[in-house]
Image (spheres, rainbow, N blue to C red):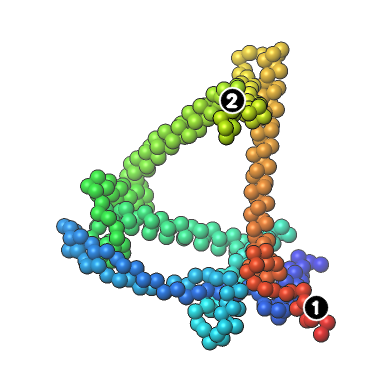
Amino acid sequence: MSPSKSWIVIIAVIVALVGIRLSIGQGMGKVYVEQVDTVVEVEAVAKTKDHDGSPAQTVKWTQFNGVEPNKYYAAQATNPAQTVVTLSWPRTFGLWLGAFFTLAIFSFMYRDNPGYRLAEAVIIGVSAAYWMVIGFWDVVVPKLFGGIAHGFVIANVLPTLPAPPTEQVIAMWFALGLGGILLMRLSSKGAWISMWSLAFIIGVTAGLKIVSHVESDLIAQSVATFKPLISPQAGATGVIELGPTVWASLANILIVVGVLCCLTYFFFSVEHKGVVGRAARVGIWYLMITFGAAFGFTVMGRVALLAARVEFLFDDWLWLIDPAGKRVVEVAAAAGSFLFQ
């Protein structure tokens, strides 16, 4: 069978199974929300040179919180005409989109295909746009605009934004100037001007990262290797307990021995023979165990992600399982009545 015909058969089978599941029991793939009216009292803004002040006011809005299907069924049983807990079509559509893109990504296990490439492009594009919006509203608006145009921001966007100190205002004007210079990269003749901003950004970032990495990686890990070989462990009554003391002391000894042996393995000025060679071989064992544990941890993380997506498909989308008890779904009985009616 040709690949194109194989894909037609696979898609047809999936569509048929989803169609059958939609007609069984309570259906599948629905998201319900509860309407909650929120009222917040906004305090008055003091009068400043950038803002003429504003009185206290009441802000009201309606919020829709996701709820379990059981809550919707209970509300419908109590009052079929209620509109507090309802089906959310936008979130339901998003749920089905998530299921589609999950299956499209999984389809790469068969072979590269247009569905996988579409899902890959959409995920990358949406992620980039999402982080751009987050950066704009969490950094640019409160910090940059809040520093150079504080009155406008609190009057139109963030009424509770505190007044920035003078140092922040100066820093934000400087940052705005660097950003403007960085845009010269778009000019064919003035692209060299943007190098000044790039040099400043890279230099400051490198300086900050070096300090943080030296403190967190070099110094902290070096201090962590200076362990007492004997580590007495006192119990609740203050008396030294033998068992915990032995295990804590053994752990400290293994750490100290491992550090010394690993350093010996990477010490190439002395030939690895005799005591040095045996210490180096012990260091190799330590390194292999560490690399194996790190690799196993990575694999476990990926397997956890896979399990989460499979649970999403079978729980949130297909409603075939219900580990959290979010709904009452008798799939087996409904399927039996559907097949043998």
Residue 199, disc: none
Residue 309 percent location from the top left of the image: 65, 60
- Closer to the camera in the image, 119 or 331: 331
Please identify the quarter of the rendering in which residue 137 is found: bottom left
Please identify the quarter of the rendering in which residue 93 is found: bottom right
The residue depicted at 31 percent of the width and 62 percent of the height is 158
Check disc 1 and report the residue beneath it: 336
Q: Is residue 184 above or below residue 248?
A: below
- Closer to the camera in the image, 7 or 297: 297
Q: Is residue 22 above or below residue 99?
A: below
Q: Say if residue 93 shows up in the picture.
A: no
Q: Residue furthest bottom?
A: 81
Q: Say if residue 163 shows up in the picture.
A: yes
Q: Residues within 10 Å of mark 2 (few under 14, many from 20)?
A: some
Q: Is 98 on the left-hand or right-hand side of 273?
A: left
Which quadrant of the rendered structure holds the N terminus? bottom right
Secondary element at image label 2: loop
- Closer to the camera in the image, 85 or 291: 85
Q: Nearer the viewer, mark 1 or mark 2?
A: 2
Q: Residues within 10 Å of mark 1 (few under 14, many from 20)?
A: few
The residue depicted at 65 percent of the width and 34 percent of the height is 290
Secondary element at image label 1: helix
The residue depicted at 67 percent of the width and 64 percent of the height is 323
Q: Is 178 on the left-hand or right-hand side of 98?
A: left
Q: Residue furthest right?
A: 340
Q: Is residue 277 above or below residue 124?
A: above
Residue 275 percent location from the top left of the image: 69, 13
Residue type, mark 1 in image: Gly
Check disc 2 and report the residue beneath it: 231
As measured in the structure, the alpha-carbon distance from the residue carrying label 1 to the one carrying label 2 is 64 Å
Residue type, mark 2 in image: Ser
The residue depicted at 33 percent of the width and 71 percent of the height is 59
